[in-house]
Amino acid sequence: MISKGAILAVAVGLAGATGMLAAFMSTASPYVDIEQAKKASANNLHLAGDINPNSLQVDARQSRVAFTLTDEKGDTVPVVYEGHTPANMGDATRVVAVGGMRDGVFKADKLLLKCPSKYESKEKA
């Protein structure tokens, strides 16, 4: 026979696990493409793509970075980030912008940069 203490311990454990899962799910932010981002109303979306190097504008005095992002489907969207400019922003080729769409612009709260590795060749054969 199972004791009441064991049943209580299992119930408390399940309740704790359910609470942790619910907390994780409420803060999880999905990766989306530009089309999905334009339809979403969330502000914690991960939008990955290439930075158009000709579009990069860095205003260090205003703590503002703006650029055009191109996703894997070839769609483009303007991205604006207000905050400290990442140190390697000029070297970045890919970015994950975390934020949401506002008035046709993806407003990023965070930028995760992908820079070319110093071990990769500059020009591929």
Image (cartoon, helix red, strand yellow):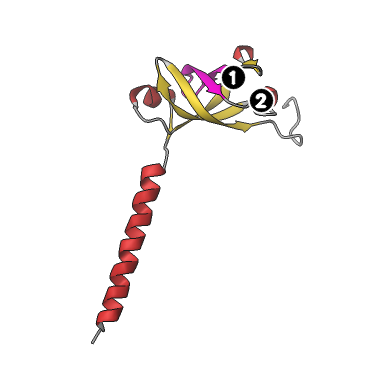
Spot occupied by residue 123 in the image (x, y as percentages of width and height): 74, 25
Residue 81 location, quadrant:
top right
Q: Nearer the viewer, residue 8 or 36?
A: 8
Q: Secondary structure at mark 2?
A: helix
Q: Nearer the viewer, mark 1 or mark 2?
A: 1
- Left or right: 8, with 76 as reference point: left
In this figure, which residue is indicated by the disc labeled 2? 89
| Amino acid type, mark 1 | Val
Q: Residue at x 53, y 26 (%)?
A: 49
Residue at horizontal 37 percent and vertical 30 percent from the top: 42
Q: Residue at x 40, y 19 (%)?
A: 102
**Amino acid under disc 2:** Met
**Contact? badges 1 and 2 (CB < 8 Å):** yes
Distance of label 1 from label 2 (alpha carbons): 9 Å
For disc 2, the neighbor class at 10 Å (few under 14, some 14 to 19, many from 20) is some
Q: Is residue 70 magenta?
A: yes
Question: How far from the left and from the top, in percent, is residue 69?
Answer: 53, 20
Within-10-Å neighbours for mark 1: few <14, some 14–19, many 20+: many
